[in-house]
Amino acid sequence: MNHDVIMAGFGGQGILMIGNLLAVSGLRQGLQVTFFPSYGVEMRGGTANCTVTLSDRAVGSPVTSRPFGVIAMNEPSVAKFGPRIRPGGVLVWNASLVGPDAFARDDIRSVGVRCNEIAEDLGNAKLASMVALGAYVAVTGVVDVARIGEALSEVLPEKAHKLIPLNLDAIEAGRAAADEPGGDGHG
């Protein structure tokens, strides 16, 4: 198994947080992992992306030009990284900020989830990236969702540990949205 995913969006959307969370979850599952963060000059409001590779063997490079998956939290991220997805791969996109016609390919699975609305319904708009991660895990099965729950206490700062149940709710809501009839989480 060799699974690589690029996660991208605006700085401040929690992109690096979910990348780190997926990486730590993979480690807890016994996988070899790389986590390669990147962000623009301005963290909040600028662009942020990271690449996470999970494998059952040593990972040769943290960089990928043709990822299996992309989680895109905004339209510029869909435009930049969507074309790079390998045939048969997965695109999970934030349907709150990206229109359904922003990107189309018939050789990948494309799943739109209204991440912002789901997060707001849970009472915290900052959870949108956790919703997206939950959808991605549901669609790909790359890690066991229980590992994500275990990893939250390692990834979140101690002062935020009281928010772990809310983060778990967001991940579960993303999983449920990805499984809605039609399989696109926004219909």
Image (cartoon, rainbow, N blue to C red):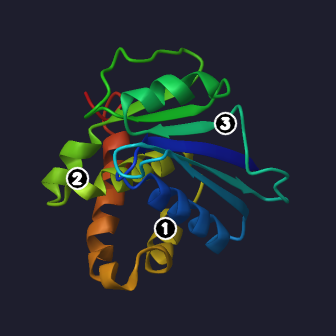
Mark 2 is surrounded, within 10 Å at the Cα level, by few (under 14), some (14 to 19) or many (20 or more) other residues, namely: many
Give SS at disc 3: loop
Give the label, 1 or 3, closer to the camera.
3
Q: What amino acid is found at the position of numbered circle 3 in the picture?
A: Pro
Mark 3 is surrounded, within 10 Å at the Cα level, by few (under 14), some (14 to 19) or many (20 or more) other residues, namely: many
* Residue nearest the observer in this picture, 77 or 181: 77
Q: Earlier in the sequence, mark 2 or mark 1?
A: 2
Position of the C terminus by quadrant: top left
Q: Quadrant of residue 125?
A: bottom left
Residue 121 x %, y %? 14, 52
Mark 1 is surrounded, within 10 Å at the Cα level, by few (under 14), some (14 to 19) or many (20 or more) other residues, namely: many
Position of residue 176 in the picture relative to residue 61 (left or right): left
Q: What amino acid is found at the position of numbered circle 1 in the picture?
A: Ile
Q: Residue at x 54, y 14 (%)?
A: 106
Residue 58 x %, y %? 85, 59
Question: Does any portion of residue 183 appear in the rendered image?
Answer: no
Q: What amino acid is found at the position of numbered circle 2 in the picture?
A: Ala
What residue sits right under mark 2 in the picture?
A: 119
Residue 147 x %, y %? 53, 70
Question: Does any portion of residue 49 appear in the rendered image?
Answer: yes
What residue sits right under mark 3 in the picture?
A: 67
Disc 1, disc 3: CB below 8 Å?
A: no
Residue 185, compared with residue 11, is above or below; it is above
